[in-house]
Image: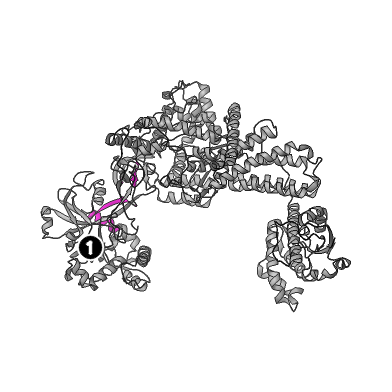
Amino acid sequence: MMATESGKAFTRRDRLLEIEKKVRGWWDEKDVFRAEPGAGPAKPGEKFFGNFPFPYMNGFLHLGHAFSLSKLEFAAAFHRLDGANVLLPFGFHCTGMPIQASADKLAREIEKFGNPPLFSKEVEEPVESQPEPEDASACPPPDKFRGKKSKAVSKSGGQMFQWEIMRSFGLSDSEIAEFQKPGKWLTYFPPLAMQDLKDFGLGCDWRRSFITTEMNPYFDSFVQWQMRKLKDMGKIIKDKRYTIYSPLDDQPCADHDRASGEGVLPQDYTLVKMEVLPPFPLKFKALEGRKVFLAAATLRPETMYGQTNAWVLPDGNYGAFEVNDTDVFILTERAALNLAYQGFSKTPKHPSCLVELTGYDLIGLPLKSPLSFNKVIYALPMLTILTDKGTGIVTSVPSDAPDDYMALRVLKAKPAFREKYGVKDEWVVPFEIVPIINIPELGDKAAEKVCLDLKIMSQNEKEKLAEAKRLTYLKGFTDGTMLVGEYAGMKVQEAKSLLRTKLIETGEAVMYSEPEKRVMSRSGDECVVALTDQWYLTYDDPQWKESAEECLSKMNLYSDETKHGFEHTLGWLNRWACSRSFGLGTRIPWDPEFLVESLSDSTIYMAYYAVAHLLHNEDMYGTNKAHPIKPEEMTDDVWNFIFCDGPYPTSSKIDSSVLDKMKKEFEYWYPFDLRVSGKDLIQNHLTFCVFNHTAIMAKHHWPRGFRCNGHIMLNSEKMSKSTGNFKTLRQAIDEFSADATRFSLADAGDGVDDANFVFETANAAILRLTKEIAWIEEVLAAEASLRTGPPSTFADRVFENEINIAVETTRKNYEKYMFREALKTGFYDLQAARDEYRLSCGSGGMNHGLVWRFIDVQTRLITPICPHYAEHVWRELLLKDGLAVNAGWPIADSPDETLKAANKYLQDSIVLMRKLLQKQITGSKKSNKKAAPVATLTEEKITSLIYVNEEFDGWKAECLNILRSKFDRKTGTFAPDEEILEALQKSSVGQDANFKKVQKLCMPFLRLKKDEAIAIGAQALNLKLPFGEIEVLQENLDLIKRQIGLGSVEILSATDHDAKAKAGALSSVLDQNPPSTGNPTAVFLIHNR
């Protein structure tokens, strides 16, 4: 039930909200999260500096932000509780495209639809099929573009109008109009985000908060220094490179500038020029006097020797586009647009179409294609070409391409099909497969062999064809050898690049690139690949990569998946365009026409946190208050002095004590110990962070740890605004309270896989926390009824031990940043132990000191996750001095594993005896755990005789003796299983006539005891348990009687021959189910009243 749907739950939630507001007042009063450096350099473990990628300020913070941030918050809170000096700062990112694009959209909407705008109810939006990645164009047949009714979109393929998005934020129409100015976003959203995080309970030093962009002159100076330093080191150069590009924004479109397609890179092709031979058809009249080419994009230039034809899509839309004064390329408009941004258009960035064509106009064109052994080939129809990948023109090499082989076979075998598309026999029938590559096991006609082996009969067998392509393309590249041409005898993987270079140098082909997949910019247009002359960071520099690898090798990455993610990124990462001409940010200092893009101004800003409070005077904008240091005084010499151990800036106007304090702050807090982030930032931001630190910082200031997590789902479904399965941080706090939200975030999951925030868990947390407060209040009210004195009973010792176990295991879980496990061991398990203790104590009552210790320890252990609850209990219920958040980790004795095992033995024995009683009285094999005691049900008095065998005997004793002889106490390992089995066969057990029968019992027993010995040591192999079974049961007679409902209980030794006689007629039970070590047997004597 949702918190807002139940009056009682609503009241409980409101109680938590009241507590949270009160506790935040205590924190503010004590300024508890203010972080100041120690007197000298930090010793290991003395300080903890953790940070989080500053969120983008084009809207409210949501639970996705909160989930990643919670990992940092819980870690920082644990280290603070453990006595470390903790710095957790938080900034707000405003650099880049999104805010500017959104502001411009608002302006366009107002211009088009009025203020406030009146939108049409429905718009058509195109939906395209998704191509397969193997080829440029030859893929399964696409669905035609189809209209889908929807609300108008703010970004292509996406959501609402920008105005509607702003309305969804709760803004009035009069307020929305103000957001046409980008600056309004920067003054509106960051303060709201800060307040939401304060209400969330974030343990942040807010003095160090700031926004980015040139609106903040101090951070602007910091970024300009960073860029100048990188350029001076040769890490930033100007170059022409292929990059994803937004035609509408007229600038490169990096990951954070994209509405969709994050991580997509340019895909390079060889564009083969297949010359159209005269005479031209009538439709080509306007092209007379020009060189006309069908332009086919291929990933396999080495196969061009085997061309038998070209493929076109009959219904496809093509055009004849001017490349220059003489050459014309026939291809799709989409490909022409990409080429226009790569220097292959008469008018740069604007494709010029001389003639609009369809695929039907191209069928039958005679072609002269580079490298082809067939002097003339023809354009033929293929129905499975995609026009949204490649150029819509496909070369045909049936020897090595399964799609081509099947399509050519169909054309040859079906005259009716040829007639339908006007294909003459002489364009098809004479052309045979041309062997060009030999592949071991597949021969020199690999496509034909694989199609025959897989029994592919039709072009519609997509899965089989995909498998055929995988086999031929992979083996062809890795194992293939050229049979023809000037590189005959050379491996395909060596010849490929040589042939590509030759084709381009001879003018028979050109370089062509396009996005691997569709990319939409935040401005709403589909991106292309452009060959741009701009500023790049040289992440492809081998020496720089070596430094990055060295840094990563010394970092704690907390999971193999994260480590592999970085390794993969370092494998493909190339030069990175770091300049933009549109958006918000810092100007490139030596080329102010450009801005620093948003992933390049956020690589070492963690260092800025060390000094931000000294520059900003608690003003995140750096402009709204009087400041002790002027922005222009933060020169490169000053920044170098602070961060790079540069010489003292003697010409600086800044007071020397302030300079020394800034340097001291940095030297104390750096390097940062932990950065928490979603795993999607491995491929850009986090890797860039490593590169830039290794370039600018000394090795002892390189990052120490990255902890990456997956995305958050809500109630097992993807979080999405479009589906309504979405919740802002503010909504979660208002609905569940901050602590219940934090509780559910901790419970959501810790790994790199996607986690799950469950509303039921948050609501259950409201109930758990408020009920626990009520229980503590009840205990305090009845304090006089508690048993005084030191812990004395078995139940006391067990509960005290469970508290010690919780302290130790929960610490380990917090240290590993496994917060779900910390919640389990520090809260769920500890509460279960408390509940068992209450039950075990019976009329004697709980021990006063233990109850107080339990409340104290549980409060401390839950503090990192539910700090408001913990502060309330700490201060108002336990009446402790100070604050829970820095109360210190609880001190505890080492856990007693023997005592833990003894209690497990007791509890398991009670369950076993209940089952035996149920079986004896009712004949049922099923226990009735929740039923009333059987004695009450039968109204008869029951005496239980519990028989115990405290020492293993027979074949079990022999097995243990063998295991002890085969166990190495130093290494904690056993001899090989074969050796153990051989010893068993030679033993007295193995020589017994019934060995085969007994062996089936021996093997699982041996496995069990081996596992126990590896876990706890050689004591697991003793013939007796590490505790006295009779002693444990004897000490807990009252508990056994209460739990099972018995009148009296007697504990007897199975080795006492006189004891068996007490069972009387039930002695047969002992024969059928004899007691063994760790497994007592009970018989029940029923006496009529």
Looking at the picture, how far across and down is residue 755, in whole percent?
Answer: 52, 49
Residue lying farthest bottom?
993
Q: Position of residue 1076 (x, y in %)?
A: 77, 65
Q: In this rendering, would 583 be left or right of 752?
A: left
Q: Nearer the viewer, residue 731 or 102?
A: 731
Q: Quadrant of the C terminus?
A: bottom right
Residue 16's x, y, as percent?
Answer: 59, 37
**471, 545: nearer the viewer:** 471
Work out which residue is located at the far right of the displayed protein and give it: 1058
Q: Nearer the viewer, residue 196 or 845?
A: 845
Q: Is residue 138 left or right of residue 761?
A: left
Which residue does the image show at 83% across and 64% down from the upper left? Answer: 1085
The reply to whether residue 266 is in sight is: yes
**Can you see residue 818?**
no
Label 1, on which residue? Answer: 310
| Location of residue 941 in the rendering, given as x and y in whole percent from the top left corner | 82, 59
Q: Is residue 365 left or right of residue 805?
A: left
Q: How many marks?
A: 1
Q: Is residue 992 above or below residue 594?
A: below
Describe residue 170's horizontal placement relative to residue 485 as left or right.
Answer: right
Colour mode of the rendering:
one colour
Is residue 875 highlighted in magenta? no
Tell me where the magenta segment starts and ends, as one range: 498-526
Disc 1 packing (10 Å; few <14; some 14–19; many ≥20): many
> What residue type is disc 1 on?
Ala
Q: Helix, strand or loop at disc 1?
A: strand
**Does the magenta segment cover residue 523?**
yes
